[in-house]
Amino acid sequence: MIDALLHAIPLVFAPMNILAMFIGLIAGLVVGCLPGLTVVTGLAVLIPLTFGLDPMFALGMMAGMYNGGSYGGAIPAILMRVPGTPASVATVLDGYKMTQKGQAAYALQVALLSGVIGSVLSSISLILLSPPLVSFSLLFGPIEYFWLGILGLATVSSLLGDDLPKGLIACGIGLLIGAVGQDISNGTERFTFGQLDLLDGFSAIVLLTGLFAVPPVLQIVEEAVKTGMSGDKLKLHRQGSALSQWRFFTPVWIRSSIIGIIIGILPGAGGSMSSFLAYNEAKRVARNPETFGHGNPEGVAASECGNGADNAASLIPALALGIPGSGVAAVILGGLLVHGLRPGPQLFREHPDIVYGFMLQFLVTSFLLAIVGGLAATRIFGQVLRLPRIVLAPVILLFVTVGVYSVNNSLFDLWVLLGVGLIGYIMERLDYPSAPIVLGLLLGPMVESQLRLALTISGGNASALVSTPIAVILALLSAAILLTPAWRLFRQRRTAAA
Amino acid sequence: MEVTEDAAPAAPEGRSRSPVEIVFALVLVAVSLAVIATASTYPFESAAYPIAIAAGMAVLGLWIAAREILRRLRRKPTPGAFALHGPRLGIGVAGLVAYFAAISLIGFILPSLALCVFLPAAVGFRRWGLAAVVGVVCVVSILLIFVYALGRPIPEDLLSPLLAKLR
Amino acid sequence: MIKRLSISAALAATLLMTGAARAEYPEKPIEMIVAFAPGGGTDVAARSIARYMEKYLGGSARIGVINKPGAGGEIGWTTVAQGKPDGSTIGFINAPAINALVVEGKTKFKMGDLQPIANLVYDPGVLVVPKTSAYASLKDLIDAAKKASTPLVIGTSGASGSSEHIALLNFQRLAGTKFTPAFFGGTAPVRQAVLGGHVPAATMNLSEALQIAREGNIKVIGVMSAERSTYLPDAPTFREAGYDVVVGASRGIAAPKGVPADVVAKLEKAIDQALKDPEYLDAAKKAEIPLQYLASSDFKAFLDRATTDLEATWKATPWK
């Protein structure tokens, strides 16, 4: 391995390949920060163009795009409350509140730094720990995935808001929306009303965008503020630097990175789950959990770090087994194939310099992201807020509309966007939290389908659900997550009563 | 005027959103019941999951509606108005609906430019030049990124043939 | 005012374009519809081949790949079938998934609404078991299934009604036993489940099993093709074991019905040349893509046979 790494270093640092990483990174930032456009789309367009180029050049672009895209998603989440990707929903919760408090630049910096730390640790684990992590990921079958989904859903306890029944209803709405579409195991069309567009269910990105982007547009119109944010509030040096507070953030970073890496290596869980779990964990152990959701920088740090740590880790099963851990990893696999690199154990034997070179590129692009994002992106994107707020409303809507349309090329999705947006507005005004809807929508289908698979395989024997050690551990963890806030509430009430 | 500090600024006094609370909760109950009715025609293994969730939602919806009615009876309805500014909310919703309808009819570019200029104007923003410049910059950058760089389509447009010539 | 001017300019431009004399095909940009999301197998295949087709269509030919995902491909395929038959709309179709949808009778199009142009890829199905499995052959599996008190579970990467599911139905009929299909809905999860030993057996496509099978991490106990695959010559076929199960996933290009014959011929030729392009061929070989070129008439015969077979199965055992 050391040999291969040493061989790979000159390849990675060849001028052309550094250029490739830069190009990929900047393209990733752009697609990541535009809602509806994802790294998957960017890569799908990019890969055929790299046909016939040197593999390291192409892989460098892919690595850059992956890392750039995951930070890019945080930018509109923080500045405009529009999550660029599902993984940045948890970033919205505190990031946008920080912007409202005039800490936009600081929030962006925390997001960037946390994302970089996460992806650096993740890249290192990709380089050093691939073999053991792979065998760990194979322990997960339908039973374990079912409990993993439950664990993810349990984090709803940290997203419920102040009104318990309303939070639960929001989660239920997400779960129900997730149930729309064709049931793959018997072809039953659930709640599709004969609409072809609904056969695959609602697209998560469309719902997410409608839910988060349309209500603030309406609110901006209602407030009709005709001035923008003053330049002062966007200057970094007035707000302290996240880097100098490393002592404060380190515990959050470590926990979130571990969570992100573990979720990353499990195929099918995905970056959104990493960020929600990391956010939940940060809130759970915090001394002041009530400040989460009201602009606590730790919330932004946890979410973005978890998301960043997911990236390289999701490539571990992809490279070592050919099983993609995420949509992006799947496309990267396609890209490797285009270059005649067949993922799997033999890839490490036949092309060790390229494999380790690719892993190094992940590490290098993480550092490049810190430079590019820190020097340019944060400064440039923040300036959008200087526009008069009322002018921002149509701007948000324009980008959201074209992004949502381009997901499926369908006008139907635009009407879904509008409908969900209006319902989202009503719910927001009635203090129904939005994040549990997203959680239910993303994880509900996983829980249902894995439960049914597990029961099919066990011949309908429900006791099989707790037949493996991992399943039991995950079940206990879920219970712990659910009970922590309840326990807190109970203690608070007792102290209040006493 | 500074940027508002909080997401939900204090509502105008004397009005309560409580009727909307009740209506929305009851709508949720109705939707849940409809879900249960629809799902009961599906095979058991497909129906169990949505029915279980919808049943829970119906109960929670009833709880919220009942709670709000009780609060009204005690003359302590949930405080806060539903809309920050009713007329402007109307303008916003109408603008959105018109925008999406226009996209279906004549494509993305013209309605988008119109939205950028007229939506702010409708609520009293008078710097036409700035609004127009922002609109043009946005549309052009969307075209550059989505259409030219990434080859993603935009909704079918009256101007598409013109764009095709420019390529 | 400005707005009205630009509308009339646009209208004028439209009129000019339609009024222009019909130049040689492809004068207009060609839209290549992909019925799956960007980044999927079909999408990557389409985007790769599109570049080479442009090269061989000559001069100013431009092909834009448009994703119309949804409903297991139905949305995209409907778009192709209902497109303008002038060669400006073509699309990737995946047999036998498309035939199965049509046979179920819910689609807005019939197979006859499509003009097959050429097939590019044929990827046979395989039945695999974990490396630690006690089943070394199809016979072991069937014997075990016949003895077992509950039907043996077989994971499939598809949904109900997918080619793999239909292959399983045929197989259990021929073998006189019963299996319980477990639908994973994607290749990645079923591959992981069989690697980790969470299911006793699974079906997938050969190209998806190739690497891990060669490494010895799973065992391929049956290939659903007429002859053994050159990529995995050690793996026996279903036919060798006495079960006539020949099922595979194919990817080909079609156009709406009524496309002029010269356009079909031109596209067909471009695809043939693209598939023979040394650069493309080299990459496809390295990636072990099971290329199988079928010209328009052969592709049509292939599709017709798939439809007839599925109609027979649907009558005997409807899969939905």
Image: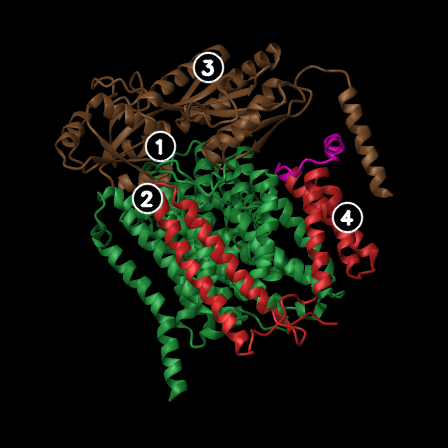
Circle 4/circle 1 CB separation < 8 Å: no
Which mark is drawn over residue B45? 2
Q: Amino acid at mark 2?
A: Glu
Q: Secondary structure at mark 3?
A: helix
* Residue stretch in magenta: B148-167
Q: Dividing the image into 4 quarters, which one contains the N terminus of chain C?
A: top right
Q: Nearer the viewer, mark 4 or mark 2?
A: 2
Q: Do tag 3 and tag 1 residues touch (Cβ < 8 Å)? A: no
Measure the alpha-carbon separation of dots 3 and 2.
39 Å
Q: Mark 4 belongs to which subunit?
A: B
Q: Are marks 4 and 2 on the same chain?
A: yes
Query: How far across and how far down the image is residue A467, in percent?
Result: 20, 53
Dot in front, 1 or 2:
2
Question: Which of the pair A337/A157 is nearer the observer?
Answer: A157
Residue C162's image quarter?
top left
Which chain is displayed in red in the rendered image? B
Asked if one can make out residue A475 in the rendered structure from this viewpoint, the answer is: yes
CA gap, disc 4 to disc 3? 49 Å
Residue placed farthest to the left in the image? C147
Q: From the viewer's perspective, is C153 left or right of A100?
A: left
Residue A453 drawn at (x, y percent): 30, 43
Q: Which mark is residue B114?
A: 4
Closer to the N terminus: mark 4 or mark 2? 2
Query: Which chain is displayed in green in the rendered image?
Result: A
Task: Please name the residue that numbered disc 1 is placed on.
Answer: C208
Q: Position of residue A418 (x, y in %)?
A: 61, 50
Label 1, label 2: how far apart the Cα atoms are: 30 Å
**Three-letter amino acid code at the position of disc 1:** Glu
Q: Dot 1 lies on which element?
A: helix
Instruction: Tell me the CA gap for discs 3 and 1.
Output: 24 Å
Question: Can you say whether B29 is above or below A408 in the image?
Answer: below
